[in-house]
Amino acid sequence: MQRSRLRLAIYASAAVVAVAGGVGAAVAATNPTTKAAGVLTASFSKDSDWGTGYQARYTITNGTGSAVNGWQLAFGLPASAKLGSFWDATISTASGVSTAKNPAYAPTIPAGAKAEFGFIVNGSGAPTSCTINGAACGGGSVPTTAPTTAPTKPPTTAPTTRPPTTAPTKPPTTAPTTNPPTTTAPPASGAKVLVAPYVDMGLLSNGSTTLSQLGQSGNVKSFSLAFVTSAGCKASWFAAFDPRAKQFADQISAVRANGGDVKVSFGGATGVELAQACGSVAALQAEYQAVVSAYNLKYIDLDIEGAAVADPTTIARRSTALAALQKANPGLKISLTLPVLPEGLTADGLNVVRSAKNAGVDLDLVNIMAMDYGRAGQDYGNLAIQAVKSTKDQIKSVYGNSDAAAFKMVGVTPMIGVNDDQGVFGLADARDLVAFANQNHIGFVSWWEANRDKNACNGALFQCTNIAQSPFDFSKIFAGFTG
């Protein structure tokens, strides 16, 4: 999720971009720039590298002593590397140089603060050049306004949305340091999954918290597990663990023993989604099937955002593979999780829904990432409700069904607490959304993310809500959704 799924957060100068849940420090930068005092600087670092590609980020530090209004970072890649998906910035590429600009909802870097954006590179080789607002990234004379005027209006397409899951630093082919369970998770419980918060499974990979502990404390039984991406054309838990090794199977078994179930979510805001990595429908279907078989899944979720939501080739490949997967696994329920604005799904998101329908996918849910609208200061509870209504109308237009049937196909996933765009979804907003969801009998309620609710802290947005709350307050409110 935003949603979510993301982290172009503006961090205080003392803050450090941390790796989720203490899983490990990010891979060291390749020739990172030195940050000079009194200037605007930018440093490059890799989060993970799987040989045929890598995930990286630029962190921009404002040491100028005054706010920087709009930023523009240009970087070149060698011929051996090609820019893939990206988040928390808008990026265009021409003549081998990619130019990243601040998102519309976060145009300013306050004095002493940082901004960050991330991206995927297919191939190998670190950036060969870097300028920030026209000056060298390592420091130099630099204007406090970007060379081009930063947009001031809210984005017309839903922004990239949720703090990305952060993988452990080990390469994708490396097995976990402790032997994962080798027994197959028991069959799905058969329980209808109505409430299932997203869980960044990278935060659970060190064993400090379990799904059962999250469920017992928050009064929820089911979970959406984020995220399975790719290591080449191979399914991988956030570029760290092979699902075929049944990582987390013991935790899934415990959830089912308690009467709940899990959805495994493919995709997310970071990493390369399998439909982008696999060049054929057969190969893609085989990777989805491997995960379904490993955990005896009854539910899967496809979280499609960033560049993936606008790529017609991979959209068609994914839809065809999902239809075949569903045919091979009768009863498998498939949801699409998509960016949304209060006015409804973006045109790209609606095309994803149409593609699935036309390919023959029996779609269970369209789950909307009701977050990061770029409208800080407005009521994010009301905006989430408006987004549900708008999406219901769009589903009616695609499927020709009734209001009641269309509402039943809508799921909603807000980002609890402070969003990446500094909008706030508070406890009162959660109560309003649950009341609306019960009144209109929508199909599903979730939120990003269960560990943020558990922590109930102030700090980096990937782990804290940054509002006044007690641990699991949101979980206990959302547990009141009955369908």
Image (cartoon, rainbow, N blue to C red):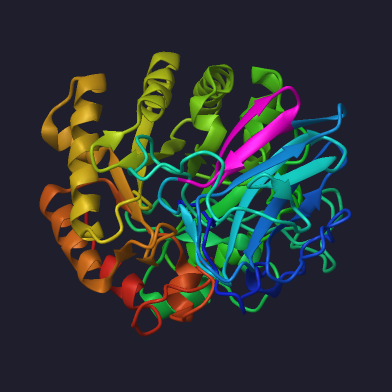
Please state if 261 lies on the left or on the right of 175 as rendered.
left
x then y, percent, for residue 45: 77, 55
Residue ID at (25%, 61%):
377
Q: Which residues are magenta?
A: 83-103
Q: Nearer the viewer, residue 266 or 252?
A: 266
Q: Is residue 287 visible?
A: no
Tally of marks: 0
Query: Viewed as shown, does residue 469 lie left or right of 142?
Result: left
Residue 448 point in image, percent of width and height: 43, 60
Asked whether residue 302 is drawn in magenta, I would say: no
Inspect this view and state whether residue 413 appears. Answer: yes
**Residue at 73%, 31% in the rendered image:** 97
Residue 156, quarter of the rendered image = top left
Q: Residue at x 57, y 69 (%)?
A: 113
Dominant secondary-structure state across the stretch colored magenta: strand
**Viewer-proximal residue among 91 and 332:** 91
The percent position of residue 350, horizontal first and vertical second, equals 35, 26
* Of the pair 183 and 356, the residue shown nearer to us: 356
User: Which residue is the extreme one toward the bottom?
Assistant: 470
Q: Residue at x 65, y 33 (%)?
A: 274
Residue 251 on image: x %, y %? 60, 66
Q: Is residue 91 magenta?
A: yes
